[in-house]
Image: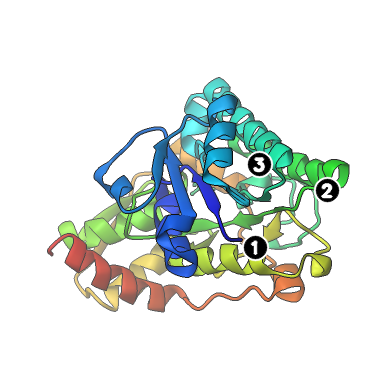
Amino acid sequence: MKKIMVTGALGQIGSELITKLRSEYGKENVLATDIRRTDASEDGPFEILDVTDTQKMHTLAKDFGADTMMHMAALLSAKAEEEPLFAWNLNMGGLMNALEVSRELNLQFFTPSSIGAFGPSTPKVDTPQDTLQRPTTMYGVNKVAGELLCDYYFHKFGLDTRGVRFPGLISYVAKPGGGTTDYAVDIYYKALEQGKYTSYIAEGTYMDMMYMPDALQAIVDLMEADSSKLVHRNAFNVSAMSFEPSQIAASIRKQIPTFEMAYDVDPVRQAIANSWPDSIDSSVAIQEWGFKADYNLDKMTEDMLAKLKIKLNA
Ligand code: VAH
């Protein structure tokens, strides 16, 4: 990877991925693109791009001299349930454009899948790398189709496609929008702002999670891995921890003893969470490219609260 083009660069992952890549590969070697410009876009090469615009995507990648495409633009699970047709067009149309541009220009390719690619009939505990995938959400359908499309572009055209199934990601830079796991980010903000949080996900609902620094390192490690060692390519299970709302509340109370937790379950996002695994098995990613996570729940909580205190001037 030397000249990297990123779509969805202002999103929850994209906004921190840009910073990570620019520190690893040089500011001028990372082209950030997104559908709108913000002041965050001024810290290096940036272009406006709607990922459904194939021609502009091709022109930007070619003019930049990209050798790598990281396609991060997508509508997340809860938003996709509100607008399934829009989600299909954006998630699948954008992915197909990114794969076609990468094929035409022979770019190394990354896009994330998700634990959302699993469904209620998938084994819920220690979910294997290769198992039944019958998701019941539009987001999950998009992610399974995306995994298969990326495999197809590898087998049919020899495109070097790679990807991981991310769990819920927790970060303090850009807030996630329209996801099901967003509660695990919101809770830290509300803990500092209000000393309490009302969870829309029910107590006892386990989901896989990961702190953003581990997610970003996983992307770089996978993309730098020896291709000949990769048996799987586009959907490596990666997870750092699995917890349910009362456990993250307990972790916060170790830092803020007076923190209070309440529950007001959102049936839509609860149904999505119920359809996903409790905990996935990351052993194949560990074996094929040395995946590892440095942050557990308490270490993440300490760092999140410390960084948010500065960000919120709390
Ligand atoms: C979502 N944060 O909630 C995303 C992610 C596994 C969850 O895909 O939709």
- Mark 2: C-beta under 8 Å from nearest atom of ligand 1: no
What's the amino acid at mark 1? Met
Q: CA distance from mark 1 to mark 2?
A: 16 Å
Residue positioned 80% across, 59% down in the render: 232
Mark 2 and mark 3 lie on one chain; the one further toward the N terminus is: 3
Q: Nearer the viewer, mark 2 or mark 3?
A: 2
Residue 189 horizontal/vertical position (percent)? 25, 57
Q: Is residue 213 placed above or below 101 in the rendered structure?
A: below
Look at mark 3 in the image and give the residue it sits on. 143
Q: Confirm whether residue 83 shows in the render.
A: yes
Kind of element beneath mark 2: loop
Q: Secondary structure at mark 1?
A: helix
Of the 4 image quadrants, the one containing the C terminus is bottom left
Q: Nearest the camera: 5 or 71?
A: 5
145 over 72 or under it: above or below = above
Q: Earlier in the sequence, mark 1 or mark 2?
A: 2
Looking at the picture, how far across and down is residue 146, in whole percent? Answer: 69, 40
Q: On the rendered structure, is 246 left or right of 273? A: left
Quarter-of-image position of residue 148: top right
**Tag 2: amino acid:** Gly
Quarter of the image where one finds residue 194:
bottom left
